[in-house]
Image (spheres, helix red, strand yellow):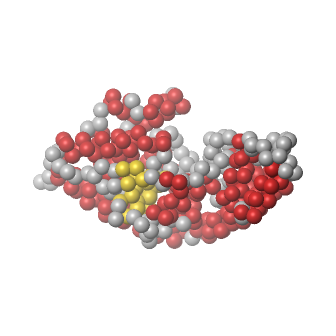
Amino acid sequence: MEIVVSGIRPTGNLHLGNYFGALKNFISMQNEHDCYFFIADYHSLTTHPTPQDLHGNVKQVLVEYLAAGLDPEKATLYIQSDVPETAELYLFLNMNAYIGELERCTSFKDKIRQQPQNVNAGLLTYPTLMAADIIIHKATKVPVGKDQEQHLEMTRQFANRFNRLYNVDYFPEPQAYNFGKSLVRIPGLLGSGKMGKSEGEGNAIFLADEPAAIRKKVMRAVTDSGPTTPNQEKPEPIQNLFQLMSVVSSKDTVDHFNDLYNNCQIRYGDMKKQLAEDMIHFTTPFRERIKELLNDEAYISKVARMGKEKARASAAKTIKEVREIIGFKSF
């Protein structure tokens, strides 16, 4: 059974793009692999060093991932800062990481442009912390997006460098977990791009959104004046609406509005009303489960403790062996 590791940033609520993107695949993976999913609260400090409510953010993300279907009995779901062994391995990896290779990292260059007043050491050494997160469990597979591929390559580099420097065959070389066609792109409501918060709250439908909020967001979705010739190609904002409908509505509903569009009879107001109701129907089980979990402090604590114990057992074994390999010994 392959060991899979993936991180989750505690910086925002889950939206449909998250769910139909990686999360559905995580839920499937937990039945087939030895999975470690962690909430990356250490990582979040590189861009938000003084969070207003870090604990609250972590709790919300933990609850929403549980509500969406991650099972703490099947996967190890833990909080990064609950496993101090990660920080120790991060320290060891930094001793053998070179300033030049870290400065050449694309994400570091992007971040120093985005936050020139906060170019901290954590940003520079982000790749070594990510590597520590992965190889602390001796992972063989890592689900990554395009923006993380360079970091995974650097993780392999750090793992291989450790093996080479200490003349051991200890860390495996983690490979990218390819979701293939199962990774669905969910567009945003503002006309272009994928669903997310970068263009504002109105661009995304969150799993915890109340029905009134969903209706308001969908009714404000970008459209045009309508088709003027039969079967004409749909412009991006309209194609986005149909893409959203295809993931939450029945095939008959999608076909109905597609026929109206192709015959130049579509009324976008009617389509949006239907889409909003279908989104409400789809998100209701998640929303209700989120509310239920937020009121169950005992269960949340139990899940966090269970994840901590399982993750630390794996991490402690790795650190013990790494310290022996490097040459640390107790007197």
Looking at this rendering, what residue extends furthest in the front direction?
230
From the image, which quarter does the N terminus lie in?
Answer: bottom left
Residue drawn at (30%, 32%), measured in percent from left and top?
98
Give coordinates of residue 232: x percent, y percent.
Answer: 78, 43
Give coordinates of residue 25: x percent, y percent.
Answer: 51, 59
User: In the displayed structure, does residue 166 sit left or right of residue 275?
Assistant: left
The answer to whether one can see residue 244 in this image is yes
Between 265 and 272, the one lying in front of the other is 265
From the image, which quarter does the C terminus lie in?
Answer: bottom left
The answer to whether one can see residue 86 in this image is no
User: In the displayed structure, does residue 296 sit left or right of residue 283?
Assistant: left
Residue drawn at (40%, 56%), measured in percent from left and top?
5
Give coordinates of residue 230: x percent, y percent.
Answer: 83, 46
Give the answer, above or below, for where 291 lies relative to 132: below
Give coordinates of residue 176: x percent, y percent.
Answer: 40, 50
Count of numbered badges drawn on the protein: 0
Residue drawn at (48%, 46%), measured in percent from left and top?
145
User: In the displayed structure, does residue 194 sit left or right of residue 108?
Assistant: right
Looking at this rendering, what residue extends furthest in the left direction?
331
Residue drawn at (38%, 44%), measured in percent from left and top?
152
